[in-house]
Amino acid sequence: MILILEKYWLSFVYGTIITLFIALSGTLIGLIFGLITSLIKNIEAEKNSSYIKKIILKISNFIIDTYITIFRGTPMMVQAMIIYYGVYSLGFEWSKIIAAIVIVSINTGAYMAEIIRGGLQSIDKGQNEAARSLGMSQKQSLIYILMPQAIKNSFPAIGNEFIVNIKDTSVLNVIGVIELYFQSSSIAGSSYKIVETFTITALIYLFITFTVSRILNYFEKKLGFIETSFPSSQTNEKGLVKNI
């Protein structure tokens, strides 16, 4: 293992940087997708809304529900093959790194939409009613009152999605993205040291996810979350409850 590290350490470093870049970019863009889709889904047609507006909202909700169902119900590896080679079949050439970010972003957006939806549901309905009574419109209430709280309440789940993306970038080797797993496969093929090479790879992944997890835990404490061992309607997906 030491000899492999001495000879191929630059390849491991390059693969790690690409992995982190794709995971971070995909998570941030996916979060934006999730916020937009959640915002649209939570806009309700008011009594004085036009018939056309109601139809547009119904069509939008149907498209969003279909998008979430498809991308949460199929593996990212399959999505990568369809999206990457689908674009090529239309006569367009694009960078594998860009393709990887697009694939991870679209996939993550579907999960983020559900995460943000859960965050919105955790907010007391009285806050929306109070905002409306102060003269805010439905959109203003969502954007300025509810969404910031939903993001804060969903922070542990959002951080967990980033950690998942760090590991899931390994499936992008099917379209030739030179991330950590792809580099490891090439090194293992050149050195014929499969166990040793992938042991190094596993340790790198473990180090990254452990470090990111500790950083996220630090920010969770700063945001006022505490660990809880009991189930509650106030707990989120990671078993954290807001410290009131």
Image: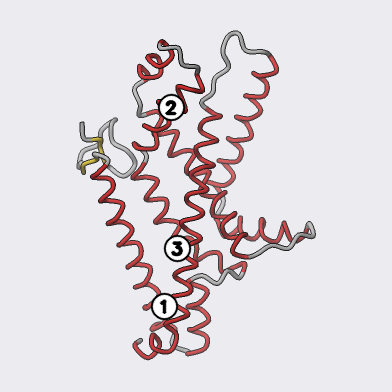
In the rendered image, residue 198, in percent from the top left (x then y), is placed at 41, 78
Q: Secondary structure at mark 3?
A: helix
Distance CA(mark 2)–CA(mark 1): 47 Å
- Label located before the other in sequence (2 or 1): 2
- Observer-nearest residue: 99 or 231? 99
- Label located before the other in sequence (2 or 3): 3
Report the residue marked by disc 2: 144
- Observer-nearest residue: 88 or 196? 88
Asked if residue 14 lies left or right of residue 196, the reply is right
In the rendered image, residue 154, in percent from the top left (x then y), is placed at 37, 39
Q: Which mark is residue 20?
A: 3
Asked if residue 188 lies left or right of residue 224, the reply is right
Q: Amino acid at mark 2?
A: Tyr
Q: Amino acid at mark 3?
A: Leu
Q: What residue is rendered at 34% in x and 22% in y? A: 124
Report the residue marked by disc 1: 198
In the rendered image, residue 26, in percent from the top left (x then y), is placed at 51, 53
Q: What residue is rendered at 52% in x and 45% in y? A: 109
- Label located before the other in sequence (3 or 1): 3
Q: Secondary structure at mark 2?
A: helix
Q: Amino acid at mark 1?
A: Phe
Near mark 3 (Cα within 10 A), the count class, few <14, some 14-19 or many ≥20, is many
Q: Is residue 64 above or below residue 139?
A: below
- Observer-nearest residue: 175 or 28? 28
